[in-house]
Amino acid sequence: MGSDYFNMSTAIADVIGHPAFGSFGRLLFPVNGHHYSGTTLGSFRLTYYGADPAKNVEIVNYLKSEAENGRQIFYNIYSEEEISADRTKRDTGLFFFRGKKGERFAVCNAGGAFAFVGAMHDSFPHALELAKCGYNAFALIYRPGWETAFKDLARAISFIFDHADELQVNTDCYSLWGGSAGARMAADLGTYGPAYFGSGDYPRPGTVVMQYTGHDRYSRFDPPTFVCVGTNDWIADWHRMKARTDALDRLGIPTEFHAYKGLDHGFGIGTGTVAEGWILDAIRFWEKQIGKSYLCG
């Protein structure tokens, strides 16, 4: 079976059950099926977001190819003992989109109103684009509740740091990315650090990339922050996002802000919209904080 095995007519059930994905294929899609519609990759749609059918197909074919070429694509962030003690932790983990060996890493966090994890539209595409640019990107599947989501992200960061040699990633100036609920997670981990959420004294991220969220907490310890949102977002008011960005500016924290005219909530990587290409702007913003030449574009 070639890397283009899946197509828009492929049943979601067949993706979930494919041997390349083992027992974690179900985590490619929201565990609670009430939060998506459609039975095929071409008809798959997420609540609040929709989806890009061509990107759905590209993502699952990429992951399948990686797995069939002997590369581990999914990592549990909790031990078997921890999962046995709390069965909700079996619905967590990191999908790994590999970049260059020894390159820095990013963790991408999908939105879903803390009710589901919309990874197929809101974190997998971002992670794939980062990997294409040579960065090591992880897409976190977290428990959707408010408190558990933040704890799972903090745990994911500690897992990556503790396994950096095995994963072949550079932990300096790592970045956290997120859309909607996922952006709140990324921002709060930037403000408070992993220890605040119970996962040990690990460094804050070197950069936070936030999409479409009304989150407004911040501190003088916040990392450099890239922000983007649509002017027609009915959930996240772009004025509120701009106000937070301005507050960070006043503290001397580097920022970059983009409000894309006419865009609604949840535009993902922005393919075919006025925001197309924003992800390269965000990567370059991160690279400024790293202090290195561009890997991408």
Image (cartoon, rainbow, N blue to C red):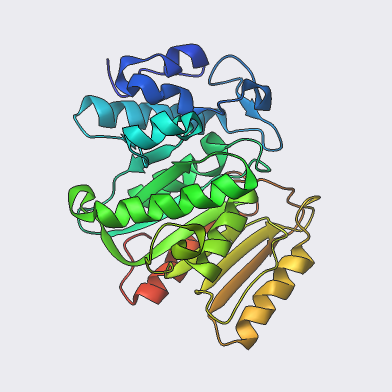
Give how far across and how far down residue 256 sits, in percent.
58, 73
Indicate left or right for 287 with 118 as reference.
Answer: left
Indicate left or right for 14 with 188 as reference.
Answer: left
Q: In which quarter of the image is the C terminus?
A: bottom left
Question: 98 or 143, which is in the foreground?
Answer: 143
Q: Residue at x 24, y 55 (%)?
A: 164
Which quadrant would residue 248 be assigned to in this image?
A: bottom right
Indicate left or right for 197 with 156 as reference.
Answer: right
Indicate left or right for 228 with 277 as reference.
Answer: right
Give how far across and how far down residue 10 sits, in percent.
48, 13
Residue 11 visible here: no
Residue 213 visible here: yes
Q: Quadrant of the N terminus?
A: top left
Residue 292, compared with residue 70, is above or below; it is: below
Q: Residue at x 40, y 49 (%)?
A: 156
Question: 233 or 277, which is in the foreground?
Answer: 233
Question: 55 or 167, which is in the foreground?
Answer: 167
Residue 261, compared with residue 13, is above or below; it is: below
Give how far across and how far down residue 229 sits, in percent.
68, 58
Give how far across and how far down residue 94 sits, in percent.
39, 41
| Count of numbered badges drawn on the protein | 0
Question: 215 or 279, which is in the foreground?
Answer: 215
Q: Residue at x 52, y 27 (%)?
A: 29
